[in-house]
Amino acid sequence: MRVTHLTFDRVPVADAVRYAAEDADVTLRLWEAFKPQLHRKRVATVYETLERPLVPVLARMEMAGIRVDRDTLSRMSNAFAQSMAGLEDEIQKLAGRPFNVGSPKQLGEILFDEMALPGGVKGKTGAYGTGADVLEDLATEHELPGKVLDWRQLAKLKSTYTDALQDHINPETGRVHTSYSIAGANTGRLASTDPNLQNIPVRTEEGRRIREAFVAEKGKVLVSLDYSQIELRILAHVAGIDALKTAFREGHDIHAMTASEMFDVPLDQMTPDIRRQAKAINFGVIYGISGFGLARNLRIPRDQAQGFIDRYFERFPGIRAYMDNTVAFAKENGFVQTLFGRKIHTPEINAKGPGAGFARRAAINAPIQGTAADVIRRAMIRMDGAIGHLPAKMLLQVHDELLFEVEEAAAHDLIGVAREVMEGAAAPAVKMDVALSVDAGRGANWAEAH
């Protein structure tokens, strides 16, 4: 027997009305039955206070977009191409012969067959692995792997940003309009796509230069407001680290203070190298870094890196206690929580084998990173009402930073209002032991503003 199915657009209107009315009625009844249960179990608060109110805010930001100068991007692409060519010459001289730097297979043969560097492992295809982790390890042994990493970084900047961004400029607005995903990460961080404007590297000079192409309209400036070391401040609060709390309250250089505590070096004798090591440890600990990972970051022997971490925990024992307690909670409950009640599930926390270490590090970091994400969401939700009287628009959110475009004469007023909103974003839900602090800057382009 043949059954004929009608699509909804061919259903008689009277029948469609009854169906749609019943659909709406049953949905409302279910909502009235389930909503009190959700509130009793405290699972609706994050949705109602952080998720739902953020949707129209993000929509306005996506519509606003940000102006990008095509000529600047084109000049940068050419400059990156020249730098890459120069690096290729250096790499081939170090290798002793010409080869395709972009070929992992040829690179593996150079490193492990011809130069006999340690750690060569062949994959299923028979080629050596030459991923970033392999090259970072080898960079402590020889100059060539480090040069290849530099070349790859430039190649990525060129292909992903200075070339590709030109295709994302809207011909009608002259601006780039990214799309934000509100559920892009389980920690609550927003994700940016088409194009991704959150992964533009800022730790290298070349990466920072890309921000020069993001410019203000005539008569306006870009204003950047950025939380200062928010995750370290949250760590000091949740782990109860008195030394870190005091340092933040008194406005000390937190990395220099940590170095002084760890290495018994007076602040007035601090060297940039010692401070750099302490900074890497400060941020590494937030992510549950291992001695192996720190050794890669600092390009130092693994036993020395592990010694740094051990000494760090000796000086700040509350951090170890926080980590152990957080992992224990995750193993018992299957999730961790931010200070605002966001649940971040940890399904792999009780797994055995290679994934166990990653799951543990993720559980340790999630409450800190998630709380920071919740704080900036709260600030964004309040921002529209706070700056509505100013000739300004919020354009971008990049991790701990908010970027605005404002008429030049109103930039000072915007900074004052936006800073107040951001620094007070945790209250009244959470009373922080360490005050939040926001750095601000302005300029004709994003690089100048930040």
Image (cartoon, rainbow, N blue to C red):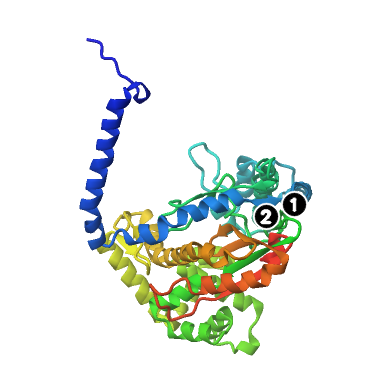
Name the residue type under label 1.
Answer: Leu
The span from disc 2 to disc 1 (Cα, nearest Å) is 8 Å
- Evaluate whether residue 289 shows in this view: no
Q: What x and y, as percent, mark residue 434?
A: 46, 80
Name the residue type under label 2.
Answer: Asp
The one of 331 and 51 positioned closer to us in this rendering: 51
Q: Against 397, is 160 above or below?
A: above
Mark number displayed over residue 87: 1
Label 1 crowd (10 A; few <14 / some 14-19 / many >=20): some
- Label 2–label 1 contact, CB within 8 A: yes
Q: What x and y, as percent, mark residue 129?
A: 54, 46
Q: Is residue 21 left or right of residue 338?
A: left
The one of 125 and 415 positioned closer to us in this rendering: 415
The N terminus lies in quadrant: top left
Q: What x and y, as percent, mark residue 11?
A: 32, 22
Q: Is residue 339 left or right of residue 279?
A: left
Q: What is the secondary structure assignment of the residue under circle 1?
A: helix
The one of 284 and 371 positioned closer to us in this rendering: 371
Q: Which residue is mark 2?
A: 150
Q: Against 449, is 15 above or below?
A: above
